[in-house]
Image: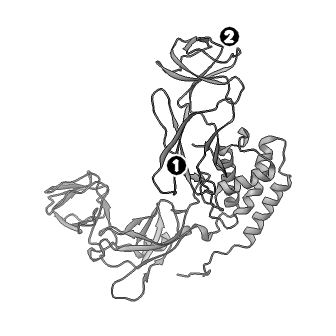
Amino acid sequence: MFPQALIKHNIGNTIEFQNTLDIRAEAYLSEITSIGDVTIPVTNANDFTAGTILILLSSLGSDNAEIVVSSSHTNTALTVAATIQSHFRGNVAQQINYDQVVVQKSATIDGVYVSLLTQTLQVTQGNSIIYDAVGLSTDFYKLQWRNSITGAVSTLSDPFSVSSYDSESVGAMSRAVKLAMGIRESDLKVDDSFILSAMQDARNIVQTNLFGIRMPWLSEFEYPIKMLAGRNYVDLPSNIDFDSTDRSLLSARFVIPNISGPFPLRYVDKRSWNNLSYFLSGSTLASNITIGAITITLDNVGDFPSEGSVFIATNAHTETIMQVEYTSLDQTTNTLIGVTGVTRNVVAGTQAWVNPNQSQPIYYTVFEGRIYFDRIIPDIMQSNNLYIDFYKKMDQITSLYDIVPENYREMYKLYLRYAVKYRKDNDTSQDDADYRSFISLIQAVVSNVYTGQTQRIITS
């Protein structure tokens, strides 16, 4: 992860960012070393990579920290280029993957980024500083770590500029809190990882208090799900909040040609769905079948007559429901025998039906991550959309550039202030004024929820 970058614009742009090291392995010096030494005795270098590697001697930010190139090593000593600092017994020696930062620049956020400069990390400081003498307040930058030995580079950071944080972003709230509390951007205790974690903690606390209450900022309307003929279900979106009941599903409907309005499906609970769909008897294929197959093994043939037809659902939008015949079955092996009419390859898990009702569904229920209909989708509805309105899971915060969608987001600053104080002093209790104000505002949110949806009692 890349650190938060602070850009100040005056004559050009000054870019300051926290030094973040990608550490491969570490050991500790077993003896004092002097300036110019080429052998560094260490406790155990067994985990260090063989060959030429980058080594940071002493802790990042310390006065004697330096990056050296090690050409070889044993388990107890590193062979390096002459050091420029002395180091003490017990100081750390870390193998790092990158020792440089590459800065790229563009006039627009989505424009072409060109390399501005490559600079070695300033490891005696907590931060590195880069100066762009001709930088404008509207310019955008990206950072990339680089290994000066191999030339290997990391992925690029998100773009940033003087005013790159949206006013509703995590970064904007973080800066406001740090400014109010006098926290420097270089403070290693209040780094980006801490801010992101604390912000997500605040959101989780609020979400727990709002459990069962559907919030409008989590709504997803007019979401299309393309249906497959021969199936009596569609899979729910992976980001729906609850997928075992209709708790997060607001509505489901078809759009029918030549009819001015949508056709809404009616929700029923699982018990009622059992009564409505009793005629849906069948099973699923236990193994793949190929064109011309003369037997079909199902998971269960208990619903199938001793001979007759089986209707096999589609798995592609170019297919139609396949009707095949069979002359007998084996209850022990769940196999249909004497099969004819298999005109395409079919994969295991595909639904197979006994004389299903192929017509437009009217009712639905929700379980096992799916919307189940009271009838199977007929060929005439192949590839048609089912439109649903639902409530999503809350997205996790992973970047300072992430937008916080909650309209009560300002109260998270109170929790951030409390979290910073607790980070600095573990004796800070939940009787802290900022924490108490945060909890009080949660109760205010719970008491004044507005979903934008009319509440109705639906009877069967």
- Judge the density around disc 1: few (<14), some (14-19), many (≥20) Cα neighbours within 10 Å: many
Q: Quadrant where the N terminus lies?
A: top right
Residue 306, given in percent of the width and then of the height, sits at 21, 63
The label on residue 31 is 2
Q: Give whichever of discs 2 and 1 has the lower sequence position.
A: 2
- Establish if 270 lies above or below 403: below
User: Is 249 positioned to the left or the right of 18 in the image?
Assistant: left
Instruction: Name the foreground residue: 152 vs 276.
Output: 152
Residue 264: image quadrant is bottom left
Q: Is residue 308 visible?
A: no
Which of pointers 2 and 1 indicates the residue nearer the eye? 1
Residue occupying the point 18% across, 60% down: 344
Q: Position of residue 90 (x, y in %)?
A: 70, 17
Give percent across and percent down for residue 215: 63, 69
Amino acid tagged 1 = Lys
Q: At 77% across and 66% down in the image, what residue appears?
A: 443
Residue 403, position as x, y percentages in the image: 61, 60
Residue 330 occupies quadrant: bottom left
Answer with left or right where residue 190 lies relative to residue 359: right
Identified by mark 2, the residue type is: Glu
- The residue nearer to you, when weighing 16 against 132, is 132
Circle 1 SS class: strand
Asked whether 437 or 42 is in front, the reply is: 42
Residue at 83 percent of width and 57 percent of height: 436
Circle 2: is it few (<14), some (14-19), or many (20+) Cα within 10 Å?
some
Which mark is on residue 105? Answer: 1
